[in-house]
Image (spheres, grey):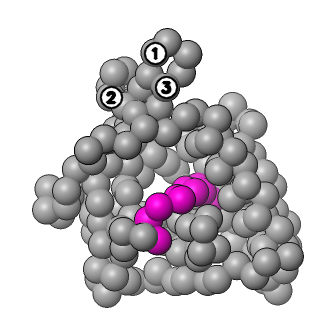
Amino acid sequence: MRRQYPVSDTFAAAHYAAHTLETWLWTRPETLDVHNVEEDPVYQSVDVDLLWVTEKACYKVEIKADRLGHQTGNFFFETISNKEKGTPGCFLYTEADLLFYYFTETRQLIILPLPVSRAWFLPRQDQFPERETTTPIGQDHYTTVGRLVPIEMVFREVKGVWKVIIPKK
């Protein structure tokens, strides 16, 4: 079954996640600065949402807001962003260092080191079920394609993945 998500819901979830995670990053002792670059065309073109400046580095962060994954036990790694236009998925092309995968209902944040996670995923992607979602836009729509990847498998097999429960404010 293909799920359908209104674009307004998708944007609202993304906006909520970005605000929540920005606020949380400011509570971290290693944080020196946080920049939201969601509206910056340069960073939009490489699918980066935040710049997180710490004592060690400046990390480019992509945020994935997920409303259902906590129920399924899977990540949805996007492999095709817009099937109709043939654009690659965020998981494959983002230039982010870290993927902040945020389950909005449970406030669980899983931080994936993106280059390591992508290198692990690519040779295995065919073993994971492929799913499509559609997003209506006016009289039209676009289709997003991704793979359902078990969260526990990623924790077992990918080094550097960590989980945090974001406290309510």
Label 2 vs 1, first from the N-terminus = 2
Residue nearer the viewer, 169 or 51: 169
Residue range (magenta): 61-70
The answer to whether residue 72 is magenta is: no
Q: What amino acid is found at the position of numbered circle 1 in the picture?
A: Asp
Q: Secondary structure at mark 3?
A: strand
Residue 31 visible to an observer of this rendering: no
Dot 1: few (<14), some (14–19), or many (≥20) neighbours within 10 Å?
few
In which quadrant is the C terminus drawn? bottom right
The answer to whether residue 66 is magenta is: yes
The quarter holding residue 16 reads bottom right
Residue at 26 percent of width and 44 percent of height: 1
Whether label 1 touches label 3, CB < 8 Å: yes
- Residue hosting label 2: 83
Residue at 62 percent of width and 41 percent of height: 9
- Residue hosting label 3: 136
- Residue hosting label 1: 140
Q: What amino acid is found at the position of numbered circle 2 in the picture?
A: Lys
Mark 2–mark 3 distance (CA, rounded to whole Å): 13 Å
Q: Main secondary structure of the magenta part?
A: strand
Q: Residue furthest front?
A: 1
